[in-house]
Amino acid sequence: MQDPAEYCRAIEAYLCKKNEGHLIRIVGPVFEQVSGWAASGVPLAIAFRGIDRYCERYYAKGPRRRPVRIEFCEADILEEFDDWRRAVGVSVLDSDGAEASERKQDSLPSHLDRAIARLTAVRGRERSKQLANRIEETVRALDRLKGTARQARGDARATLIAQLTELDHELLDTARSELNDGDRAVLREQAEREIAPFANRMTDEARMAAVEASFTRLLREAFGIPSLSIV
């Protein structure tokens, strides 16, 4: 389990930066709230992403009137955590001891729209010609699949999903080839840290699979690559 005091201090420091140096202490009931995230195993990196999401919406509304408080970020943090745990294959128990329910899966057309939008947003970034070409080819392939996604049923849908999985693997393989040994080691260490709070209830095989899934998620994040696979 992550140390609650250290966890809260890290959240406090990160939010202070987002608030341009305005420090709001995490004490009292808010400390208990944030400590609960630590107890549930919410990685700090995921909590930071949730804070970022809330702040992006907040700033988009116009000039800031008051500093962001951490309790306002909880919904975004827990949603990011839900996405993360499903991606790496770890579960969280609810207050009754049952596994927390999953969110309803998005439709295939919506999934394709979102993937195309994210890849389009990142393809202009400075990167190797190899990866830039792979992203461009992937966007064109997704555009072609989008035309049949809404009507796809049965075998046709299964074939489309298999094509998405293949495109996803090709894109990830290209991104992995961009990493040097040092970057790869850093991502692997971070993946190990993310899974550590759950390791004691996993078999060795499950833990290794979760670390690999976490590494892949971090790789996606480093390059801005969305998940194309869907189940």
Image: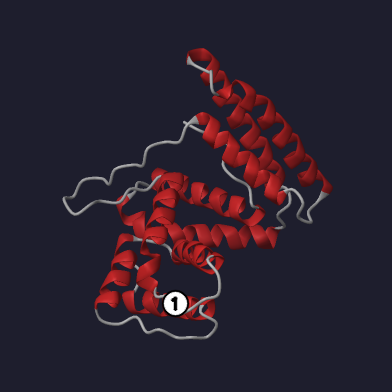
Specify the farthest residue to the front.
62
The residue positioned 76% from the left and 45% from the top of the image is 131
Horizontal and vertical percent position of residue 171: 68, 40
Q: Quadrant of residue 130?
A: top right
**Along the line of sight, the residue nearer the viewer: 224 or 87:** 224
Q: Is 151 above or below relative to 38?
A: above
Q: According to the image, what is the colour scheme of the structure?
A: secondary structure
**Along the line of sight, the residue nearer the viewer: 223 or 112:** 112
Within-10-Å neighbours for mark 1: few <14, some 14–19, many 20+? some
Q: Is 73 above or below relative to 83?
A: below
The residue positioned 44% from the left and 75% from the top of the image is 68
Which amino acid type corresponds to the residue marked 1 in the rendered image?
Ala
The residue positioned 28% from the left and 66% from the top of the image is 36
Q: Is 210 above or below relative to 140?
A: below
Q: Quadrant of residue 142?
A: top right
Horizontal and vertical percent position of residue 176: 68, 48
Residue 12 shown left or right of residue 151 in the figure:
left
Residue 120 shown left or right of residue 202 in the figure:
right
Helix, strand or loop at label 1? It is helix
**Along the line of sight, the residue nearer the viewer: 104 or 174:** 104
Specify the farthest residue to the left.
96
Residue 51 shown left or right of residue 6 in the figure:
right
Specify the farthest residue to the top.
155
Q: Quadrant of residue 179?
A: bottom right
Horizontal and vertical percent position of residue 202: 34, 49
Task: State whether residue 25 appears in this view.
Answer: yes
Horizontal and vertical percent position of residue 74: 36, 64
- What residue is disc 1 on? 10
